[in-house]
Amino acid sequence: MNAPAQNPQVEAAVAEILRHRILPRPWRAVVLAMVVVAIGLSVYQLFNLGSSIGWVILDLSYLDLLVAFLLPVVFLVFPMRPTDKDLPSPPVYDIALFGIAFLLGCYLAWNAVPAVEGGWEYFAPTHARLSSYVLWALMIEAVRRTAGTALTIIVLIFSFYPPIAEYMPGPLQGAQQPMWEIGQYYAFSAEAVFGIPMRAFGKLVIGFVIFGIALQHTGAGRFFIDLAFAMLGHVRGGGAKVAIFSSGLLGSMSGSVITNVLTTGTLTIPAMRRTGFSKDTAAAVEACASTGGVLMPPVMGATAFVMASFLEVPYVDIAVAAIIPSVLYYLGLFLQIDAYAAHNGLKGLPREELPRLLDVLKAGWHYIFSLVLLVWMLLYLKQEAIAPFYATVVLLATNQVFGKRLTYADIKHFLYETAKILAELVAILGAIGLIVGALSATGLTGSLATDLILLAGGSVYGLLLMGAATSFVLGMGMTVTAAYVFLAIVLAPSLVTSGLDPMAVHLFILYWGMLSYITPPVALGAFAAATISGSDPMRTGFTAMRLGSIIYFIPFFFVMEPALILRGAPGDILVVLSSAVVGVALIAGATQGYLIGIGRMGAGVIGGVSRALVFVGGLLFAFPGSDDLGIGHWEGVAAGAVIAALGLLFVRLGRPAEGVAR
């Protein structure tokens, strides 16, 4: 199948979301040089090449140098004002900011050793103190350009909080830090700009981002889509199942919902429309599938790497823990689509229009090989920092021999796209570091955790509901990484203190932050898909909410039962997983009004009652039980079975004597 011509609406959506400036050739060359040096620095540091040649770079110096070569790119690629994007060359003030950011990063790297030895976060000399305020201002402007106004306002509020912390009321009161000193803490402390988020970027994120971009630029996206069409295109609701499969695979590599929607959606949405799916449903399926891809191993996006740094565990532990929740989500989505297709009599695509599976595998085996290599190095060699670099080299080398060879222009485009994404991440993660630094400097983190427990009355469920609501609201106005970091500092300690598993708590926050991509009024994933299908964005968002409804419950399932994140004995995990699968199947069927093996669940009052009963029965099957509520796992399963059976009885009572079409 051939990809349709790019829709002008899609191009407009991409431009609006990404807001990149098109640079003239000389400035593109500058950006390419900067990113090549940054990648070289990462390879030098992460492969520990300094030990071989006798010149070891301090970790802080390494991060400073990454900022020196990537932060300036923001001021070239992301314009100060929307109207600046159309200028033939970067204006003088952007060039000035570019130069200042580069020189400042070099200054910080040169003085990294004196800063550590002299405790500059508290006792900085005058020149260092002045430089810290320049860094503060640059980070604020950089995040405004890359992440927008909402996150910028939040960063401003928090970064200016320490000087007035002593005067804030009640739970918001903290240790005051003078205005003339807080800047140096932000620049030279290991708890601020160069804290956990930036360290995660330098150690983990950069390699996986490069690997994800390499996959896209070598044609892996098309391979995954063709593979999905070959395997699932002919089955009932095939177009939608292709979207689920391909978007899940590509999303697990790219780590970006919007990029995923705009990459796979141009093929999957027209295919769904051809087989009878409405515009709203086709766009909603793509949005839900792409959102889930960011929650699926092995890559999962930048936030998961930051999470590994917060929890002080290898990234592979995060990826392994995320397997069952992501599989449950895709199972629920797949069953809903199958029920929708069966309910509406939708068929698959003609086999003669689909690629042959063997041909697809012959053409793209090297993509699978590079992924297998990555997983093997993560799971067995435990080389998470360097694994993506090896996988990228193998992918690029095999692609030049067996795939569609990259030209010199293709390689430049690959590096340029890498520069834009890495620069954007440096700006966002550095700004998030300002929030972390403000909370650390004032000691607000510990007091807030205690206050939240008191506010929830000591109830774990109260805390979880507060956490879900806060994660969702912050996810609407901030990047997912920013929302996660804030709640990992403020909310996670109180949940862990309440006895919940730390890994489950952090995944809970991540899941609820991601929900804003398919939930109105923001629903960026749904809105991006709507531009391709030509559907109403808000209606698409509500359709996506219904199709992805199981994702609203899964975080509660695994946070209350860590067996769903592979914590516990194998037997316990198998039992809990089995009941969760049954529960997800019942919830999916009830949501669509069609149960596989049963058929339509009827209409009218009786149909509504039967669907409600089956839905509640599914929740009880999947709900792990609670000592606080006096409900054990088996009690919940038994109650769920009885209620679901009652719902099925209503289905039979509501059917006319001649039966219902299956």
Image (spheres, rainbow, N blue to C red):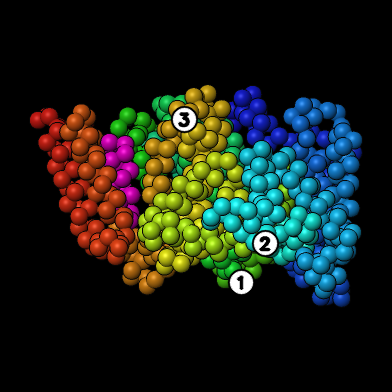
Is residue 266 visible to us here? yes
Q: How many marks?
A: 3
- The three-letter code of the residue at mark 2 reads Ala
Give the label, 2 or 1, closer to the camera. Answer: 2
Reading the image, the residue beneath label 1 is 381
Q: Tell whether label 1 touches label 2 (CB within 8 Å).
A: no
Q: Is residue 623 above or below residue 480?
A: below
Q: CA distance from mark 3 to mark 1?
A: 44 Å
Q: Which residues are magenta?
A: 580-596
Q: Residue at x 61, y 71 (%)?
A: 381
Q: What distance separates the C-alpha of mark 2 from that of mark 1?
A: 38 Å
* Residue depicted at x 50% and y 49%: 471
Q: Quadrant of the N terminus?
A: top right
The disc, 2 or 1, on the residue closer to the chain's N-terminal end is 1
Q: Quadrant of residue 78?
A: top right
CB within 8 Å, label 3 to label 1: no
Q: Which label number is shown at residue 441?
A: 2
Quarter of the rendering occupied by the C terminus: top left
- The rendered magenta stretch, by its main secondary structure, is classed as helix
Whether the residues at callouts 2 and 3 have beta carbons within 8 Å, the answer is no
Q: Which is nearer the eye, 191 or 271?
A: 191
**Label 2, label 3: how many angstroms apart (C-alpha)?**
43 Å
> Which residue is label 3 attached to?
540
Sort mark 3 into few (<14), some (14-19) or many (20+) by Cα contacts within 10 Å. many
Which numbered circle lies on residue 6?
none
**Category of crowding for the residue at label 2, using alpha-carbon neighbours closer than 10 angstroms: few (below 14), some (14–19), many (at least 20):** many
| Amino acid type shown at disc 3 | Thr
